[in-house]
Image (cartoon, grey):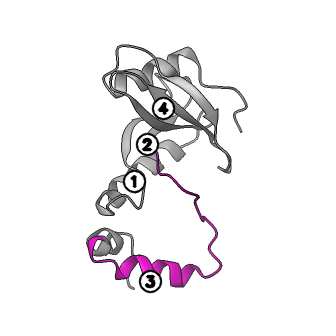
């Protein structure tokens, strides 16, 4: 787990990713995340609040998360949108993803996962994206 706040390089990368002339400012560390350091960050001009997730060096999770978020793109705000990724950490100092902020609380361990998945599938706008996540039938 990464214990530090985002470096000046990481904050500059966030600003560049959204077209801001200034580096992003860290608002606060967010709870949760098994091994990613997750921070709410804010940019000016354009004014945006985003989530920066940084992973340990050598970890492939940033690249994997970027692929998953690409598949979830059509869920109309039910999943964060990928803004930028630094899969090898060349810009941020460690692998990172920058995503949109979703308000509310995440339920990453629902009591009834099958029911939660079925509810998502029943949403008309999620049909094509959700089916892309189904494992192949053997």
Describe residue 107's horizontal placement relative to residue 19 as left or right: right
Q: As rendered, which of 100 and 48 lies closer to the eye?
A: 48
Q: Earlier in the sequence, mark 4 or mark 3?
A: 4
| Quadrant (top left, top right, bottom left, bottom right) of the N terminus | top right
Q: Is residue 1 above or below residue 94?
A: below
Q: Which residue is mark 2?
A: 99
Q: Nearer the viewer, mark 4 or mark 3?
A: 3
The residue located at (41%, 47%) in the rendering is 66
**Cβ–Cβ below 8 Å for labels 3 and 1?**
no
Q: Earlier in the sequence, mark 4 or mark 1?
A: 1
> CA gap, disc 2 to disc 1?
9 Å
> CA gap, disc 3 to disc 2?
25 Å
| Residue 32 on image: x %, y % | 67, 50
Q: Secondary structure at mark 4?
A: loop
Q: Which residue is mark 4?
A: 88
Q: Which residue is mark 1?
A: 69
Q: Nearer the viewer, mark 2 or mark 1?
A: 2
Q: Earlier in the sequence, mark 3 or mark 1?
A: 1
Q: Nearer the viewer, mark 3 or mark 1?
A: 3
Q: Earlier in the sequence, mark 2 or mark 4?
A: 4
| Quadrant (top left, top right, bottom left, bottom right) of the C terminus | bottom left
Q: Which residue is mark 3?
A: 118
Q: Secondary structure at mark 1?
A: helix
Near mark 2 (Cα within 10 A), the count class, few <14, some 14-19 or many ≥20, is: many
> CA gap, disc 4 to disc 3?
35 Å
Q: Is 68 contained in the magenta span?
A: no
Q: As rendered, which of 120 and 55 lies closer to the eye?
A: 120
> CA gap, disc 4 to disc 1?
17 Å
């Amino acid at each position: 787990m990464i214990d530090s706040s985002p470096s000046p390089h990481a904050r500059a990368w966030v600003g560049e990713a959204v077209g801001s002339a200034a580096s992003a400012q860290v608002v606060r560390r967010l709870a949760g995340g098994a091994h990613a350091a997750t921070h709410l960050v804010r940019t000016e001009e354009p004014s945006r609040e985003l989530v920066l997730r940084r992973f340990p060096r050598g970890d492939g999770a940033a690249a994997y998360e970027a692929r998953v978020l690409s598949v979830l793109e059509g869920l109309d705000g039910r999943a964060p949108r990928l803004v930028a990724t630094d899969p090898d950490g060349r810009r941020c100092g460690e692998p990172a993803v920058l995503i949109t902020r979703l308000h509310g609380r995440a339920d990453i361990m629902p009591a009834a996962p099958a029911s939660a998945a079925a509810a998502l599938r029943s949403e008309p706008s999620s049909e094509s994206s959700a089916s892309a996540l189904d494992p192949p039938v053997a």
